[in-house]
Amino acid sequence: MSGEVILEIRGLNKHFGPTYANKNIDFTLRRGEVHGLIGENGSGKSTLLSQIAGLYRSDSGEMQVNGKTYDPHSPLDANAHGISMVMQELGVIGSLPTGVNVFLGRTGRFAKGGIVDLREMNRAAAAVFEKWGLNMPPLNKLTENMIIEDRKMIELARALSIDPEILLLDEVTQSLSLNNRRNLYDLIARYKDMNRSVIVITHDIEEMIRITDTITVLRDGEVVGQVNSAETDPDQIRMMMVGRRISGDYYRDDKTADCGGEAVLSVRDLSIPGELEDVSFDVHAGEILGFCGLSDAGIHSVGKAVFGLISGSGTVHFLPTDVNITSAPQALANHIGYIPKDRDREALMIHASIRDNSVLPSVNELRAAMGLLPPGKVSGMAESIRRRFSVKSTGIMQSMNALSGGNKQKVNLGRWLAKDLRLLILDCPTRGVDVGVKAAIYALMKEAKKNGIAMILISDELTEVLGMADRLLVMKDGRITKEIRRDEDFTEQSVIGVMI
Amino acid sequence: MKNKRKLPKIRMSELVPFIAFIVLLAFFSIGTKGKMLSSYSLKMLVEQSILTIISGCGVLFVVAQGSIDLTVGVNVALSGVIAMHVAQSTGIGWLMVPAALLIGLLLGLLNGFIVSKCHVPSFTLSIAMLIGVRGIVNYIQTIIGVEYVPASMQFITSSGFRIAAFAVIAVVMAYLFEFTKIGRYSRAIGENETTARYVGVPVDRMKILVFALSGLTAGFGALFSMATVGGTTQTMGVFLEMKVAMSVFFGGVLVTGGSSAKFYKIILGALSITIIVYGLSLMGMSDSHISQSVEGGLLLLILFITLLTNRRQKARKEPDVPAAGETEQA
Amino acid sequence: MPTTANDSRTGRARGLKNWQFYLIFAGVIVLVLLLFHLISGGGFLEWSNIKGIISRSAYPSFIAWGFCFLFACGYTDMSIGGVVVLGSFASCIFGNWYGLPGVILGGLLVGLCLIFINFLIFTYSGIPSWIAGISLAMIYEALAFLLKISRSTKALISTSLAKEYRVLGQLPWCLILLLAGLVVVYYLYNRTTVGLNIRALGGNRDVAEKLGINVKKTLLCVGFISGILVGVACVLQQSYAGQTTVKTGLTSINMIFQPLAIYLLAQIIRERINIVICVPICAFILYSIFNLLTMLGVPSGTLQEACLGAFIILFGIIGSRRVKGVVK
């Protein structure tokens, strides 16, 4: 770190309607510094970054780059100042190929007499991927059917194609598998060596501490503190984020592997071309079976297959009713629940009411004579879910999208727990959810465990599976590579080796 | 802000179609110098809306799912022409009823199958059916011509019978839509099909079911059409699908369906459209082009206003902002 | 682990190489044409017949190209039929007054203006394009009808366009126009910043905006480009037919079925052959099929329409084979 200040922000304010997203923010970034921004959902981190990147105009306050006033009108304007960002939401155009996506908006560079030279553009795109050691998806293929990870790589390439002095990364690591994450860490390290700067947002506190030099903590739109990464620890960060001490009773504190109950699910030789290969395992009542692996390891496919959403050869056998699960409606009828990874797009109906979302998995149970769904019973169930899980809302008719991420997840989880389940599949249940709700979800899982519900916990966060599971199945390239029990060598080291 | 209000919130967007209805009624009452409000006129309004509402009941389910079924008109024509021919050629009058319903149902099932299993967008399919089936109907009619309701079945042409039958069918469909699984699942599919699938809703089955239902109500529509006119015609069902679509959207249902789909909306919309058409004819302006341009213009206006008021309810897309009025307590 | 159809490193498609596909495709077409010739008892491949097919393919090709841009933007414009009717009237009226320049300018200007208006409504009203289009179709049809019965314009419209001004509708001019259109549209769609931006906007408007694409300017361009294309179609239609009939009761939508079928067919092959090139090829294929049906005595207006409907469904099914995700 050269110590020279490259970006200076004073008294920055931004509101959306009556809410303050950023209040009086002071922020300094030096050359060669990797600076982390952390805070709960709603703390204002993305808004801050978006203003630096030219996506929003600030309401008041001042920004300076290299000592000169900086007030970008658009992302392209920010690019001209050597600043580029990889956004949190997906930012590629599906109907255009990779090469075009990297240079979209700046295709004029390759235009001769109005006609764009596609070959030249693709060459330049390939050069960017290679220079920074990123995995490159096929250049001429439309991005619409690519996996999230490939699309993130393209966005990264685009941000890097302008050779920025300041690189902004908003929750990028979340969508990446471990090996792509490592490539990103290497990239960030190289940036440091080149005396350039990076601002990183991530929810993963341990990761944040590992890869950054400094961390700024935001809470309710304001800066509450700034620490040196080398001198801090996760508990301190958590406390700053939330304002009170979170007790260590976060995950499970026992070391017993409780899988002695009767087997509830038996998967044998499950193979789905391109996703899973010869996967076999059992799940027992009251057991939390963890799955971890890289993004393409197939862990998410396991969840889908058990719920009947996808199928291949082999069997998914549900023992209590002695049936093979082949479709989702059938799984539902057999007291199996599924919480998908993408909350807003796969789990919830965002523009519908809390009531409609809460009762959806239980429609069959609510039916009375002649197919009637008594409105009283429907509302009653929704209201009881809302109360039991302390969903912060104005009533069951409130629209889902008015809720914060944590409360949405409470509805998501609560409506399944309100059913009489034998098996619950949870895919990244605490993703994008703040610390307080995270603790609440783990508590709910412990309670479900006591009630004899079998659970499959799929997660990208190693610490989470290590913290909660009785047994852990590690997957790689669609196969199960290792099984470890809670009462054995249950640490990150024993897992990472077999994951990558 | 929002917390202050204790009464259930009535959204502005829900009120727009009611306001439009009242405005139209007022406008045409004045314009026809009161003739619009006579008991005869009001009866005509109901009668002329029957066909649209009956045929539209089924379409409502389809729209709730976020799809569209514009095959109603040609379905009515096909079912009617074939059913009448069966009745006339066999001499058994009452066969007309099951025949119409069966043909309507079969065409609906075909639509449902193509949309759900072959993944063809419902709009493209509707357009294709519109032209294809109409071609078939025209061809059949060049062979058998126009036919009349057989004497044994003449009782269906009476106004009283039609209104009674309409009431029964409408009540049953309303019940199905608002209080049973089909309605709830259909709205869920319209809100977010992926979510519905992931919660275990049998989506493909539901899609085929609602298109079949839509075909069935078109079968009923065929019977009503022939009951009103006394037989088949060369222009049976022409423009009906547009009337139905207009009624659904005029009533305030969003194109994406979902929770915005409610049964009363199709009744409201159909009555509104009928007021325009009937009102214009009362005012002596029944030329098709005037009627059509007015309908077209008003439809645009209504859609625009409904969307405008609906947008205010949807959350803005800024990241990381807590809901207004709520702060997350960790 | 996930297998893609393309080699990760070079991005080239596995399976059939492109040139192999082109060869097979061309071969199939030749075979089919020969087959038609046989079935029709030898009348199909006569030059006068082929000439007719080409002339008939011209105007729908331009509309289908207009669709390429409109659909790329996510818009389905159902009012194009109504626009073509009005545009053809303009061609007719101005053509009879001012001769050939009148034909061209009349059609172009009216087509351009109306499509532009449609565009403004699609973009700024927020109403889904397909239903806004239907409403607009109703209005345009009513307008055309009004022109037909109003005393002042009645006579102007019923006069058909004089023969010497209908040059553009026949070979060689319509073929030249077709080829010129092909070149221009190809470059516009694939190789210009404008074209790429248009497709970006259609793919995901929010993302495109965030990347700094000027949305308003791009949309204006779409309106302009598709307006010109429809305008040319108006000119061709009037030149080809000499007279335009007024449509009411939304029958103007029938006028777009054929270009729509062409577009859908082109969509199926678009993975291998660029969609812009597919359009005139598919137009030719479609009209060859109709030509054959007519030769075989299948009555037009009834069963030919039925066939058209069936084709659209068939092409739609084939084209949707590999569609994943939600289809409404």
Image (cartoon, coloured by chain):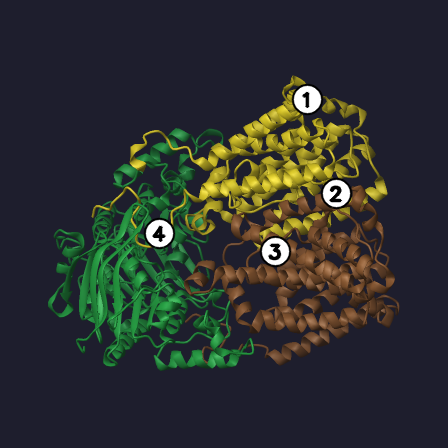
Chain colours: A green, B yellow, C brown
Q: Which residue is mark 3?
A: C116
Q: Could you confirm whether marks 1 and 3 are on the same chain?
A: no
Is A52 situated left or right of B297 in this image? left
Q: Is residue B231 depicted above or below A6 in this figure?
A: above
Residue A450 appears in the picture as rendered: yes
Q: Which residue is mark 1?
A: B161
In this view, the mark in front (1 or 2): 2
Residue A339: mark: 4
What amino acid type is highlighted by mark number 2? Leu
Q: Chain of mark 2?
A: C
What amino acid type is highlighted by mark number 3? Phe
User: For the residues marked 4 and 3, what is the alpha-carbon distance in whole angstroms?
Assistant: 47 Å
In this view, the mark in front (1 or 3): 3
Badge 4 marks a residue whose secondary structure is: strand
Q: Quadrant of the C terminus of chain A?
A: bottom left
**Crowd rating for badge 4 (residues with CA inside 10 Å; few <14, some 14–19, many 20+):** many
Residue appearing at x 26%, y 81% in the figure: A194
Q: Chain of mark 1?
A: B
Question: Residue A176, position in %: x, y?
Answer: 33, 67
Badge 2 marks a residue whose secondary structure is: helix
Q: Which residue is mark 2?
A: C146
